[in-house]
Image (tube, rainbow, N blue to C red):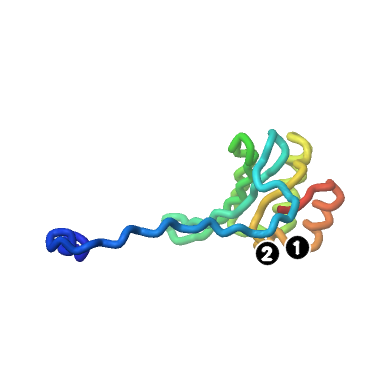
């Protein structure tokens, strides 16, 4: 509204400045998936039922094709459940070269990190 009034009065309205893209230091790890099976992305989605009960969904996605490999649903999910789901997916689709995730508690647990290391998967 203020900008409209300034224009009506013939006052100049400063142009918006373009946002700068922040450039971080490269880690040498891929920023983008280049082929199928290169990078899996995994994360949790939380939701509630009509009665107020909570549940969690583990989503695992091929980053390159955006194909959903798994939606594992459970009321409670721990690192053991995540490892079991990933192990089943690796048996069917083959282990990925990289996995991209946040640092949620389920993803930083020691046994899960050992499973990732044994399968020679790099974490992004």
Above or below for 60 versus 25: above
Residue toward you, 4 or 10: 10
> Residue pushed farthest left?
9
Tell me what residue is drawn at x 49 percent, y 60 percent. 53
Tell me what residue is drawn at x 49 percent, y 56 percent. 47
Is residue 106 found left or right of 23 in the rendered image? right
- Position of residue 113 measured from the top left corner of the image (x, y, whole percent): 79, 57
- Position of residue 45 measured from the top left corner of the image (x, y, whole percent): 55, 54
How far apart in space, not on screen, are marks 2 and 1 (Cα)? 6 Å
Residue toward you, 4 or 70: 4
Residue toward you, 31 or 15: 15
Label 1 sits on residue: 109
- Position of residue 120 measured from the top left corner of the image (x, y, whole percent): 84, 47
Give the secondary structure at mark 1.
loop
Quadrant in which the N terminus is drawn: bottom left
Above or below for 5 versus 37: below
Question: Mark 1 and mark 2 in contact (Cβ < 8 Å)?
Answer: yes
* Number of marks: 2
Crowding near pointer 1: few (<14 within 10 Å), some, many (20+)?
some
- Position of residue 81 measured from the top left corner of the image (x, y, whole percent): 71, 53
Disc marking residue 105: 2
Give the secondary structure at mark 2.
loop
Tell me what residue is drawn at x 77 percent, y 43 percent. 97
């Amino acid at each position: 509204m203020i900008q409209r009034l300034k224009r009506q009065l013939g006052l100049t309205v400063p142009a918006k400045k373009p946002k700068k893209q922040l450039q971080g230091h490269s880690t040498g790890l891929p920023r983008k998936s280049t082929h199928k099976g290169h990078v899996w992305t995994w994360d949790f989605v939380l939701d509630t039922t009509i009665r107020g009960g909570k549940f969690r969904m583990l989503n695992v996605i091929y980053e390159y094709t955006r194909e959903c490999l798994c939606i594992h649903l459970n009321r409670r999910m721990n690192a053991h459940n995540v490892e079991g789901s990933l192990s089943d997916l690796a048996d069917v689709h083959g282990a990925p070269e990289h996995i991209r995730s946040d640092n949620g508690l389920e993803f930083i647990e020691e046994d899960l990190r050992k499973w990732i290391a044994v399968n020679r998967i790099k974490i992004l």
